[in-house]
Image (cartoon, coloured by chain):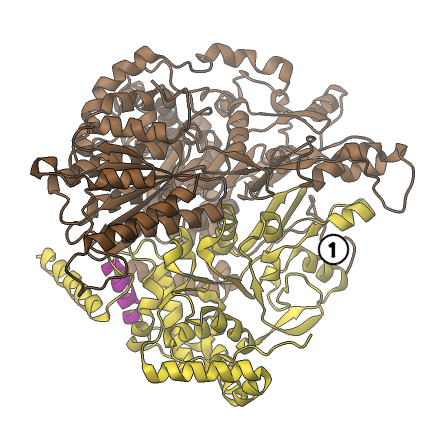
Chain colours: A brown, B yellow
Amino acid sequence: MKAQALHPSRSGAPRYRPPVYPFTALVGQELMKKALVLNAVNRQLCGVLIRGDKGTAKSTAVRGLAALLPALELVADCPFHCDPHDPLWMCFRCRERLRAGEMLPKETAPVRVVELPLNTTEDRLVGSLDFEHALLTGTKRFQPGLLAEANRGIIYIDEVNLLEDHLVDILLDTAVTGINLVERESVSFIHPARYILIATMNPEEGDIRPQLLDRFGLSVNIEGIFMPAVRMQIARRREAFDLDARSFRKKWSAVEDRLQARIQEAERRLPRVQIGEDLFREISLIAAAHHVAGHRADIMMEKTARTLAAFAGREWVMGDDLIEAAELVLPHRARSPEEAARNGDQSTQEQTQPGESPAPEQPGSESGQEAGGEGKDPSATGSPSEGQPREGEEQPGQPVPQPGNADQTAGGEQQAFEDRLFEIGRLVSIPTYDIRFARDSLKRRSSGRRTTTTTDNKTGRYVRATEVRRNNDLAFDATLRAAAPFQRRRPASRLAVKIEESDIREKVRQKKTSNLLLFLVDASGSMGTRLMSETKGAILALLLEAYQKRDKVGLIAFKGIEAEVLLPPTNSIEIAKRLLEELPTGGKTPLGEGLLTAYQLLKNQMRQDPNILPLLVVVTDGRANVGLFRDKFYDGPQFGEIYREIYQICDLFRQERTIRAVVVDAEEKRLGSFGRSKKLAEALNAKYYVLEEVLSEHLVETVRESRGNSDPHYSK
Amino acid sequence: MKERAVFPFSAIVGQDKMKLALILNAINPRLSGVLIRGEKGTAKSTAVRALAALLPEIEVVKDCPFRCDPQALEKLCPRCQETLAEQGHLHPLREKMRVVDLPINATEDRVVGTLDLEHAIQKGEKRFEPGVLADANRGILYVDEVNLLDDHIVDVLLDSAAMGVNTVEREGVSYTHPAEFILVGTMNPEEGELRPQLLDRFGLCVHISGITNQAQRVEIVKRWSGYELDSGAFSMEWQAQEHQLAERILAARRIFPQVVIADEILIRIANIAIALSVDGHRSDLVMMKAAKTIAAFHSRTVVEPSDVDECVDLALSHRMRKRPFEEMVIDPKRIEEMIAERMSSRASSRY
């Protein structure tokens, strides 16, 4: 095997590029295609987020877009693809060369789409020390990362909602400033990193952080097509592509070329597009009608409408352009009334508090890419020394939590919330809940996130390296980088690299989700309808909270003769909610089976992730009347045996020290009480509450306390 | 150590759906895999391992860690691209399709590949060390107990299973290579469910349970003890049948490109998917491919409606929205009713 065979690709080296399905051959999904094309025309639209079911050609469309992107003029040998005509946003080297009077070599190349895979480590995203160079020359050199490659291009993230938090943090930082500042592993470097984000996600898998959501100029929600003839066409084209990708692409090349030409034409036309005064007024009316926060939506609508006009071949904006623009700009910013009524979509809600008081919103959104907008606005520059101050003037700075404001919004929110939850059950304690929402939207990094634990057992995702030695989990890349600059000074050995103790770096690994809320719900006939809806209401409140905390949630229901895992531990609140709504009740009470199922599931989860902190919430009236391993024909309750089994299972739980439990007694006391839930609580060593006595509010509070997660931000 | 012969595929008693699903994938790798759901001790793993013996040979580039197809020039890995540019040709080799195991405790760097440690120390150069996804290119990636896999490993699996590409940006290396594998997973649903997104990545899904037929149960025990006693002799006994099946798979592979599917059948497929309210369009594509593969397996070049019926539950059972206390099983009669219902409601709404 040749030595250089598997060298990482450098510029110029071949990369694996599988054939791409042509963008124009996609059937339907016009809104998504439009959003992508508009971003190809005008990169100031700040990218697009595509949310949709699995299997709706989201990723295929984005990958197809790359072939249509217009060309860009750039400095030929600059790793950051600087614009030869824009000294403000140049990297150091290009500036120096320009200052020295050098003619910068120019070339034109299509806008790049840089893919950010989920397995990315920090060093590859921001860049790091080039250890090869350091070994050979003994000097330090910065090895540009993906952010450098993406400067003036597009970063594409598939399944963005699964991206690790620490990478999201980096993206947020750089997206705001347009600058990547690297201070790591003895390299210090700064370079422009202005990119737009295009991302796809399946909301079923959990949502993305609102701050990140806000970075996307446009968003579209797509779903499958339900016309058989169209579906047939989709299948036919895919079949043809799979059979012979090359001739399929050839067949579509004329159409592709036409679209690309149209995009280029629109790009040239864009600066000339005019928008009338009356339409500006229209924009603000639309924005107000959708209760958007801040002014970003207005600005985006104006830009999108102008881009639409340019793409349509006009030099003036029409009313229809505005409507189309609103369709793309508002989905993730506005709260549509019916959506708000149907489900508590927190992600949009957080940004759209019925805010006639938009002051604390919009953290730093207008800087960065937009500042560079129109190419004339010098509000930020490539030089760090003069870069930031100007931005500070334009924004309110980092948002500060304002309890007063939150209280105001809470009142209005309460109404909406109660409506939403009514069908599931009365929920009493909404106000406190809403304040938390409001606060959380302002200060998110410290709370409301999955608790990431740094693990010691060499499992989890490698996020960065550290000098601290703990468990010999060697971070080889970082160790090499640490050793590289000193190689010339160290005595020669047989190996190419001389590594000393002081070079050793270890991996810092992280794992997500340390909380797991498992609901064990009695769905038997003895649970009165009224109490059942109460129970559902309480569980929903907890689910919403779990959503914010990014806890995992699981749901087991038992009725008849069996217990079923309705929802395996997940962070998708949507599924949990739907399942809860559809949960039928009736039949006997196989409590033992329920407990055993819960026990097995928790054990399983703990095996997968030893760091998890499970909390079991049992909601039952305690009137078990089916034992374990009974079949349909079993009747004649033998309570003694049934409860003996139950207490045996409780003993199993008590042996697991990490499992905490709460028992919520859902017995209708007015009909007389057996007090069995209380005994169950004792057997489980669990906290005990009576559903009729505690308001849902307290239940929420209770579970929060039991979670043992002392989070000052959440406590009142 | 003498290697033990694997239990022959054709000697597995019953479980016809599972066997069909596996065979279909052996014929058409683009079916993107199969998920086998079932209780313990239902020959799940045995069947997957046995399938390896039936897999056909494929043409690969010699020494290529990704086993590129020397005929598919547009899909060559970076290394083969370089070789082709330098030498003008690639050295072809025939090799059996592989089954690569993904252990539950695999770390992310082993799965996606990482910096080649040895090479860096000795030569001071960066080199990419391929991981499991590279090994599995153009083969089968087998995950036993896939529902117990760590979440972040599932994420990277999804990432590359979706597009057939593995993009690595970690630990100082940046590398992209083909990762088109047949994802075969087994799971015991009692131990937890899979995320819907990962479920959707499996082209087909079968639900198996223990066999209740007494005669068959006896046969299973007999065959297994025969195998335990002398695995070599046992597989010799089954050699003829194994050979026959392998031949049939090969023949089906050969005629598959000629298989055509009529518009009416595609419409029917779409109607089924719509009637069962399946998310997205992957279900249609899978049904189409599966029906074509079944036709090829029956040595026909025209898809018949029965081919679709044969694959509906394989393709759809794991894609339907599951309601509480509802089994993931599709009743063919119910499908007919639902389609009829849909058609009539559409017809009436027209007037």
Q: Nearer the viewer, residue A223 or B225?
A: B225
In the displayed structure, would residue A342 be above or below residue A349? Answer: below
| Left or right placement of residue A256 versus residue B348 in this view | right
Kindly identify the amino acid type of the residue bearing the numbered disc 1. Ala
Q: Nearer the viewer, residue A130 or A618?
A: A618
Q: Is residue B271 magenta?
A: yes
Q: Position of residue B91 (x, y in %)?
A: 71, 70
On the image, which quarter does residue A206 sit in? top left
| Number of residues whose C-alpha sits closer than 10 Å to that of mark 1, classed few (under 14), some (14–19) or many (20 or more) | some
Q: Position of residue A200 (x, y in %)?
A: 43, 42
Majority secondary structure of magenta residues: helix
What residue sits 61% from the left and 69% below the top? Answer: B71
Q: Looking at the image, how many numbered discs can be counted on the residues? A: 1
Q: Is residue B272 magenta?
A: yes
User: What quarter of the picture does the C terminus of chain A occupy?
Assistant: top left
Circle 1 is placed at which residue position? A5
In the displayed structure, would residue B245 be above or below residue A573? Answer: below
Query: Is residue A18 visible in the rendered structure shown here?
Result: yes
| Left or right placement of residue A148 versus residue A699 in this view | right
Q: Position of residue A573 (x, y in %)?
A: 32, 40
| Left or right placement of residue A183 versus residue A616 in this view | right
Range shown magenta: B264-276
What residue sits 61% from the left and 13% below the top? Answer: A386
User: What quarter of the picture does the N terminus of chain A occupy?
Assistant: bottom right
Q: Nearer the viewer, residue B79 or A673?
A: A673
Q: Secondary structure at mark 1?
A: loop
Query: Is residue A78 visible in the rendered structure shown here?
Result: no
In the displayed structure, would residue B311 be above or below residue A401? Answer: below
